[in-house]
Amino acid sequence: MHELSIAYDIVKTARRAALDNHASQVKKVCVEIGEMSMVNPDQVQFLFDTLIEDDPVMKGAILENSVVAPETRCTCGYRGDEKFVCPGCGALPELVRGREIVVTNIVIEVDE
Ligand SMILES: [Zn+2]
């Protein structure tokens, strides 16, 4: 299942950031999900919650998903968000952005 490995990666990334910064608790993880990644954000959310349930550092952390619109370009010079047909020449544009899943921000709590 695609979403499970993604949720797992998000947890792993957040966890490492917390450990590197001697954090006692992860509060929030912000993730950008490309619209073309074919990932269901609700399912990632659910799996994230399940994965962190028994993790003392991650427990209670909020996952904030934002869906990122695709960005395409074409050999004719077109740049925009048309995914399938270039409005300039009718060819299939190349996807520049919109397939990736990126952890953009992690909010942590550090003990004194
Ligand atoms: Zn074109």
Image (cartoon, rainbow, N blue to C red):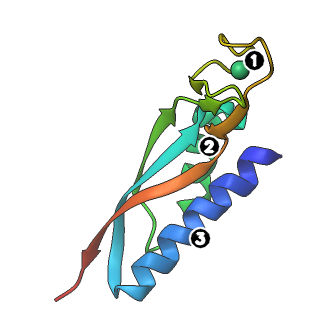
Q: Is residue 76 above or below residue 89?
A: below
Q: Which residue: 77% across, 11% down?
A: 90
Does residue 60 appear left or right of residue 12 in this picture? left
Image location of residue 66, percent across then percent down: 45, 37
Q: Quadrant of the C terminus?
A: bottom left
Image location of residue 38, percent across then percent down: 73, 33
Mark 3 highlights which residue? 12
Of discs 3 and 1, which sits in the foreground? Answer: 1
Mark 2 highlights which residue? 44
Q: Which residue: 34% across, 88% down?
A: 22
As drawn, the label of residue 84 is 1
- 34 or 60, which is in the foreground? 34
- 79 or 97, which is in the foreground? 79
Give the amino acid type for the residue marked by disc 2 in the picture: Val
Ligand 1 neighbours mark 1 (CB distance < 8 Å): no
Give the amino acid type for the residue marked by disc 3 in the picture: Lys
Ligand 1 shows up in the quarter that is: top right
Q: Is residue 44 above or below residue 27?
A: above
Q: Residues within 10 Å of mark 1 (few under 14, many from 20)?
A: few
Snapshot quadrant of residue 54:
bottom right
Snapshot quadrant of residue 40:
top right
Image location of residue 103, percent across then percent down: 49, 57
- Mark positioned earlier in the residue sequence (2 or 1): 2
Which element carries disc 2, helix, strand or loop? helix
Give the amino acid type for the residue marked by disc 1 in the picture: Phe
In space, the residues marked 2 and 1 are separated at their CA atoms by 26 Å
Does residue 63 appear left or right of residue 8 in this picture? left
As drawn, the label of residue 40 is none
